[in-house]
């Protein structure tokens, strides 16, 4: 095994991406803090084309992965957003984001970085408009309240900036850090160990290769940023840019978890339109790239991942890579500590010798549908807001929730369902 080639390939790719990823995280934090959810909701309450376009335009820069966007969209839907606008938002958001657009430019170049949000916009508008025409809302939802009724954020500017940095460098890393590492590792393994001739035959049949990519990408989970190094490694092995683009679109937008939740909240017809819109648009844009646009536009910006031995690591890029690695390590350590603390609390509740009045007031629940840290935080927040809940702790790995207080199980279950998940008592 050529460990030297593996290391050089991995570090070259992460050095190319890390400055743009960190920049994207900072912008993501600013968007999160300075554009509240209620502002989004005011623009998503209609059924017309204008509302669908606004929903897509709002969703494109937001840095939410395909599972992280689900509780956000469910909350918007229950708050008054139309089914058409919610579908448009759901399609546009996970395919792009300021972090993934920046990372796309770093590895794949400006044409890819521009085509990706354009395709997401077209796909989202088409899907949302189709839902509005074929499966409109059966009843008119109550119009959202004006933003003034919710009060303004009166925190000082420096507090908002600190919160933006915390969200970008902590919450965002919690949500996509693992998937980014997986994407980098998979791309490195493909680059170093897969022979170039394996994919040569697919160049003659791009449509067939796209269909295969769809069959692989749709059921699996991969975030918009994590899909970038994989797409680049496939191109370097001989697959066409159009095939790589299908992976960039279909992989982040659709997976089994999102299909299940969408089927419950939006209905079977809207879910079918959602999946069909993503798949058809991805293939159409893939064919457009391969047959109608200059191939030189879509060559990767770097051949670093191709295993060259003479690597050059600039000090700035290396510093960004080290910072990104430290942030990912910090996130992993936090998760381990949280899992340990949760396991201890769970053992205390289950221990018959500790059946004190305090422990008798703790109930256990099983939550299904969570896939990332954003999902866990949404479920935990939903439970914490139920009247009677004094303390709540949710474990992402097991799906277990420990709830302290006298809140009714029915109220907790309803809050979790409104957040886009399922819950059952143990």
Image: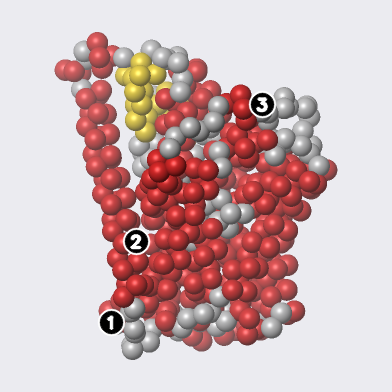
Say which mark, if any, is on residue 148: none
Which residue is pictured at 61% across the width and 62% down the height?
249
Left or right of 106: which side holds 244? Answer: right
Which of the pair 318/121 is nearer the observer?
A: 318
Identify the image quadrant of residue 115: bottom right
Q: Nearer the viewer, mark 1 or mark 2?
A: 2
Q: Few, some or many C-alpha atoms within 10 Å of disc 2 (few <14, some 14-19, many ≥20)?
A: many
How far is mark 3 from mark 1, CA to CA?
59 Å
Which residue is pictured at 25% across the width and 23% down the height?
349
Please, which residue is most extreme toward the top here? Answer: 357
The answer to the question of whether label 3 and label 2 lie on touching residues, with beta carbons closer than 8 A, is no
Give the mark nearer the N terminus: 3 vs 1: 1
Left or right of 1: which side holds 98? Answer: right
Q: Which residue has dot 1 on it?
A: 4
Left or right of 339: which side holds 306? Answer: right
Q: Secondary structure at mark 3?
A: loop
Q: Which residue has dot 3 on it?
A: 145
Please, which residue is most extreme toward the right here? Answer: 133
How far is mark 3 from mark 2, CA to CA?
40 Å
Q: Few, some or many C-alpha atoms within 10 Å of disc 3 (few <14, some 14-19, many ≥20)?
A: few
Which residue is pictured at 38% across the width and 52% down the height?
169
Say which mark, if any, is on residue 324: 2
Q: Position of residue 364 (x, y in %)?
A: 36, 24
Please, which residue is most extreme toward the left here? Answer: 353
Query: Can residue 105 be seen by looking at this rendering?
Result: yes
Q: Position of residue 265 (x, y in %)?
A: 64, 35
Identify the image quadrant of residue 73: top right
Quadrant showing the C terminus: top left
Which of the pair 164/195 is nearer the observer?
A: 164
Identify the image quadrant of residue 418: top right
Q: Few, some or many C-alpha atoms within 10 Å of disc 1 (few <14, some 14-19, many ≥20)?
A: few
Q: Secondary structure at mark 2?
A: helix
């Amino acid at each position: 095994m050529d460990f030297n080639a593996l290391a050089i390939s991995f570090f070259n790719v992460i050095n190319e991406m890390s400055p743009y990823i960190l920049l994207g995280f900072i912008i993501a934090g600013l968007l999160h803090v300075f554009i509240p959810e209620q502002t989004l909701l005011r623009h998503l309450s209609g059924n017309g084309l204008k509302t669908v376009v606004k929903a897509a335009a709002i969703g494109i820069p937001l840095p939410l992965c395909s599972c992280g966007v689900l509780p956000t969209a469910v909350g918007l839907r229950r708050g008054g957003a139309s089914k058409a606008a919610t579908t448009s938002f759901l399609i546009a958001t996970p395919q792009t984001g300021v972090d993934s657009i920046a990372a796309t430019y770093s590895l794949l170049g400006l044409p890819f970085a521009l085509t990706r949000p354009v395709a997401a916009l077209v796909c989202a508008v088409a899907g949302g408009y189709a839902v509005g025409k074929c499966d409109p809302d059966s009843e008119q939802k109550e119009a959202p309240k004006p933003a003034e009724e919710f009060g303004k954020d009166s925190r000082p500017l420096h507090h908002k900036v600190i919160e933006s940095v915390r969200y970008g460098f902590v919450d965002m890393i919690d949500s996509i850090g693992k998937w980014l590492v997986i994407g980098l590792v998979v791309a490195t393994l493909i680059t170093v160990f897969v022979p170039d001739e394996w994919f040569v035959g697919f160049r003659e049949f791009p449509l067939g290769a796209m269909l295969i990519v769809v069959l692989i990408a749709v059921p699996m989970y991969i975030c918009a940023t994590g899909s970038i190094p994989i797409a680049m490694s496939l191109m370097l092995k001989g697959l066409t840019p159009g095939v790589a683009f299908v992976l960039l679109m279909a992989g982040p937008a659709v997976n089994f978890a999102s299909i299940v939740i969408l089927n419950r909240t939006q209905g079977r017809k809207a879910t079918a339109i959602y999946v069909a819109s993503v798949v058809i648009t991805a293939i159409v844009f893939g064919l457009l790239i391969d047959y109608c646009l200059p191939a030189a536009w879509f060559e990767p910006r770097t051949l670093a991942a191709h295993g060259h031995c003479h690597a050059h690591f600039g000090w700035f890029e290396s510093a960004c890579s080290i910072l990104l690695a430290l942030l990912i390590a910090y996130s992993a350590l936090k998760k381990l500590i949280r899992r340990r603390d949760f396991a201890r609390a769970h053992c205390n509740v289950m221990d018959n010798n500790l059946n004190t009045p305090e422990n008798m007031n703790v109930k256990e629940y099983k939550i299904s549908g969570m896939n990332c840290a954003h999902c866990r935080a949404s479920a935990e927040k939903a439970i914490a807001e139920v009247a009677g809940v004094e303390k709540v702790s949710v474990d992402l790995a097991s799906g277990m929730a420990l709830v302290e207080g006298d809140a009714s199980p029915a109220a907790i279950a309803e809050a979790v369902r409104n957040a886009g998940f399922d819950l059952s008592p143990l």
